[in-house]
Image: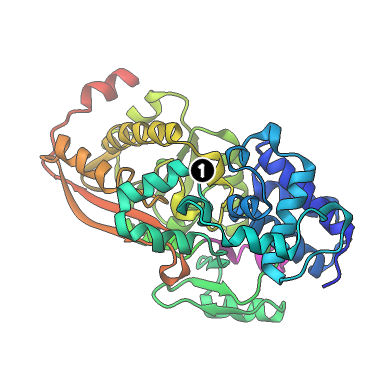
Amino acid sequence: MKLHLNVLEPIITALMEIFVDGRYADKVIERTFKARRQWGARDRRLFAESVYDVVRWWRWHWHLAGLPQEIYLTPEEITEERVWRVWAAYWIEKTGESPRLSQVRAVSTASVKEQKSQKVPPAVRVSVPDWLYALGTSELGGKWAAILEKLNEPAPVDLRANTLRITRDDLRQRLFVETIETDALSGLPDALRLRERKNVFTSQAFKDGLFEMQDASSQRIAPFTQVAPGLRVVDACAGAGGKTLHLAALMENKGRIIALDIHQWKLDELRKRARRDGVGNFEARLIEDSRTIKRLARSADRVLIDVPCSGLGALRRNPDSKWKLSITEIERLRKLQAELIRSHSRMVKPGGKLTYATCSILPSENEKQVESFLKELGDEWTLEEQIHLVPGENDGDGFYAARMLRSPNARKTEGAEEASAK
């Protein structure tokens, strides 16, 4: 393949922004595409695949480039010259050919072969930080190796038909007319998967609000909550509203959804998406302080808490997050999750149901949190069902969800708090 500097140089710049400046890979790629609208499909594909592949395998390719392991994540040591070498190692492993460029003379097929033959720690070979390899081994044991293998694969692109506007079969035909080929996913009545990566956001079908991009595993969470038309539902950590919009479609735009979040810009994005999708049965509400939650005590038939988490189940989709995470951050998230499940559960009315969900694969963020909650408040709650979605099953992300029923005879423990908040 003939390589052109007008694509390669932006790849190096993007990797510098991700590893030196700490920017998110998807945002860097999006901004680069906007700045280079003249690129064709081939250049865009080469750029995006190269950036994501190098990010995903950064530690391994750093080793293949012959660079010191102790500095692979030290911003001050990640120079442009070294990034060129990492990219060259990636390219040689991918194609078996040395790129004929002056910037990468220090890396050859022979040097990569030599580095590849060396014995390295498992964390280097699977390209994760040492602390993460140890944590996964501790929590998941023998399952961790197979999960890591899946997490290092590129993620497919899944769509969810907006059934307020169109059926899945009709959407598939609409997309085919726009030269976007898809396959229906079994077990998910509204899901389609792209046969080939394309920018679906420029399609007329997207502009008409006929679908949302949503991973297959994520599409299982809203139905798991057991919502129905006419119910009062709280999406307690709504973000930009992917699951809020799915809940609205399942509820046929009937009843009421209160979408809560601590970030106004995310709720603004939800409103924009809802207008496009024709969703009208929701209210976006900013969480300003604890009183926002207290005012909703015992008011909801269903509450979904898709809590902030490590996101380890979605590393295929966001490979740079494994380099930005730390054990300290995961410990902070665990504490936050414990606080949220306790405080937000109060919004469920007696006889209502609470769903706790994460896109993590760690038991300490998943079933252990639920077990701790039930141990403390189990006289009011019954665990109905939980699901563990392993990365790669049906090619979806890793997800966890637990649905709990609140006893119809639950004590009115929130009454005093609710009154004081008004």
Q: Is residue 130 magenta?
A: no
* Residue 109 found in image quarter: bottom right
Q: Position of residue 278 (x, y in %)?
A: 57, 58
Q: Is residue 107 left or right of residue 116?
A: right
Dot 1, how many residues are within 10 Å of its Cα: few (below 14), some (14-19), or many (20+)?
many
Q: Is residue 366 left or right of residue 78?
A: left
191 or 347: nearer the eye? 191
Q: Is residue 205 magenta?
A: yes
Write the start and end of the magenta stretch as one range. 202-214
Residue that lies at the very extreme toward the top in this rendered image: 420
Asked whether residue 231 appears in the rendered view, the answer is yes
What residue is shown with label 1? 239
Residue at left offset 73%, top offset 42%? 16
Assign the N terminus to one quadrant of the image: bottom right
Assign the C terminus to one quadrant of the image: top left
Asked whether residue 199 appears in the rendered view, the answer is no
118 or 257: nearer the eye? 118
Badge 1 element: loop
Residue at left offset 25%, top offset 44%? 368
Q: Position of residue 44 (x, y in %)?
A: 78, 63
